[in-house]
């Protein structure tokens, strides 16, 4: 990876220590970005002698970027900001242990707000993921935990991407009180950091929304119910610390995006194999771009990520569509293929595939971008009583909903990735329809 010369500098130049060696970084950028820019993308150990892994999703879900930081294990390097003098060490790649999961619960339990929440490993792992998305780690001293609070509003919106923002604009235009919660410090979702899409809607300026309606750096942990009614359990990062909030509402609109999905092929876990969304995030938010790359998968994001990298100087060696012929406007070197393979001893050095009508092809490259439909985060909707449907073979599941996002739960509507694989424009239209349906419900 190299830094773009015209990228906006986000912080001062600092130095980290990786296994005793100095590594340059930009203060505040994710550790995984600093390591990739320094050519140290192989920084965690997988099962087996000499195995290496690197960051894949950049959304704190795949656990491939775990590091030991200042002596603390299981740190998500993709979401932990770089600070001067940090000591980084490789560690055995592993999922959070039961002890770590219970530690996340214990961290929040003094507030009394997780009472009644499911205690399955999956539920606790979701809490750990949301903590990591905010750059927090329950296994070390947390920032001050501010007094818990309760809020009430007419509509609670989870997710500040294309769907959530479009819904918020409709609700705000009709004077309906709402609160929108976004886990990132910025809004826009794929519109801001995903592969660019033709005809994508604009990112709605937060200033266009009602004052105090938008809550950024706020991860929604659960949709629960108690004697006072149904509520979202939200963990928010505020200037003075962390706060857990119960948000009671008459209606809930869930429009959270899902993490990138993996594509299983030989060499798919090598350092240098990234989700296409992760590569787009590196380019658009952090000013990092691969020198050479191949892209594999299917769908619009395959071509969008390849174009984005090419426009910023990446030499794109191949774009391989595993499902069908490339569209007429596909980038150069796009073709139908099968049997992809990433090659290299400890990191990606080449990419190979079988081209339709041309046999086995091999190209030297240092990066492979994988674009397949994301895994929708359905837990919130299921907790709220919505039903899940299958999208068919090779496609992720989605929430069962009508054209206005109405689910089996009368007070829960969904939009965006939760209803299937949609473009940002389709997500925005879905958010608008869901908000219009909520307006009718509340009359």
Image (spheres, rainbow, N blue to C red):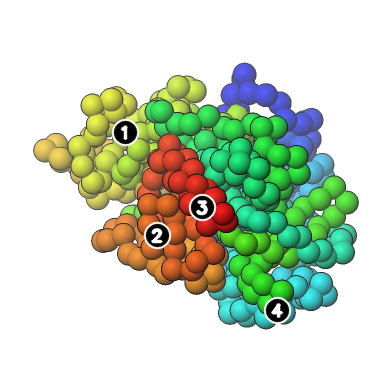
Using the image, determine if residue 443 lies above or below residue 272. Answer: below
Q: Is residue 232 left or right of residue 308?
A: right
Q: Read off the residue under disc 4.
A: 227
Q: Real-space Cα distance between discs 4 and 2?
A: 27 Å
Q: Earlier in the sequence, mark 2 or mark 1?
A: 1
Secondary structure at badge 3 equals helix
Nearest to viewer (mark 4 / mark 3) = 3
Q: Is residue 440 left or right of residue 239?
A: left
Farthest residue, direction front:
443
Q: Earlier in the sequence, mark 1 or mark 4?
A: 4
Q: Read off the residue under disc 1.
A: 318
Which is nearer the eye, 375 or 398?
398
Q: Name the residue located 79 percent from the left edge and 30 percent from the top edge.
A: 12
Q: Read off the residue under disc 3.
A: 440
Secondary structure at badge 1 equals strand
Q: Read off the residue under disc 2.
A: 401
């Amino acid at each position: 990876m190299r830094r773009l010369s015209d990228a906006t500098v986000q912080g001062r130049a600092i130095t980290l220590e990786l296994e005793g060696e100095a590594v340059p970084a930009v203060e505040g950028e994710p550790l995984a970005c600093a390591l990739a820019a320094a050519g140290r993308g192989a920084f965690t150990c997988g099962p087996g002698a000499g195995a290496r892994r690197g960051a894949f999703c950049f959304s704190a879900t795949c656990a491939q970027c775990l590091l030991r930081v200042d002596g603390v294990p299981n740190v998500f390097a993709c979401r932990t900001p770089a600070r001067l003098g940090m000591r980084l060490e490789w560690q055995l790649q592993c999922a959070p242990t039961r002890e770590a999961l219970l530690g996340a619960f214990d961290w929040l339990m003094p507030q009394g707000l997780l009472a009644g929440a499911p205690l399955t490993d999956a539920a606790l792992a979701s809490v750990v993921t949301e903590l990591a998305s905010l750059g927090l780690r329950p296994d070390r001293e947390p920032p001050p935990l501010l007094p818990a609070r309760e809020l009430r509003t007419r509509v609670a919106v989870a997710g500040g991407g294309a769907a959530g923002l479009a819904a918020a604009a409709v609700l705000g235009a009709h004077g309906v009180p709402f609160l929108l919660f976004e886990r990132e410090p910025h809004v826009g979702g794929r519109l801001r950091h995903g592969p660019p899409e033709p005809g994508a809607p604009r990112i709605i300026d937060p200033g266009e929304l009602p004052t105090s309606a938008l809550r950024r750096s706020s991860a929604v942990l659960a949709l629960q119910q108690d004697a006072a009614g149904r509520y979202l359990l939200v963990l928010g990062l505020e200037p003075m610390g962390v706060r857990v909030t119960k948000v009671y509402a008459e209606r809930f609109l869930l429009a959270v995006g899902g993490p990138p999905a993996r594509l299983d092929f030989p060499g798919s876990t090598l350092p240098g194999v990234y989700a296409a969304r992760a590569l787009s995030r590196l380019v658009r938010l952090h000013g990092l771009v691969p020198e050479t790359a191949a892209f594999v998968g299917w769908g619009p994001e395959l071509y969008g990520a390849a174009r984005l990298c090419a426009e910023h100087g990446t030499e794109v060696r191949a774009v391989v569509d595993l499902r069908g012929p490339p569209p007429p406007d596909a980038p150069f070197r796009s073709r139908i293929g099968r049997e992809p393979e990433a090659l290299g001893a400890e990191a990606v050095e080449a990419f190979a595939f079988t081209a339709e009508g041309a046999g086995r092809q091999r190209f030297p490259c240092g990066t492979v971008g994988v674009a397949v439909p994301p895994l929708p985060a359905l837990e919130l909707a299921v907790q709220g009583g919505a039903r899940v449907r299958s999208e068919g073979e090779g496609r992720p599941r989605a929430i069962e909903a009508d054209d206005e996002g109405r689910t089996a739960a009368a007070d829960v509507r969904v939009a965006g990735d939760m209803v299937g694989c949609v473009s940002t424009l389709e997500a925005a239209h879905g958010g608008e329809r869901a908000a219009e349906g909520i307006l009718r419900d509340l009359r």
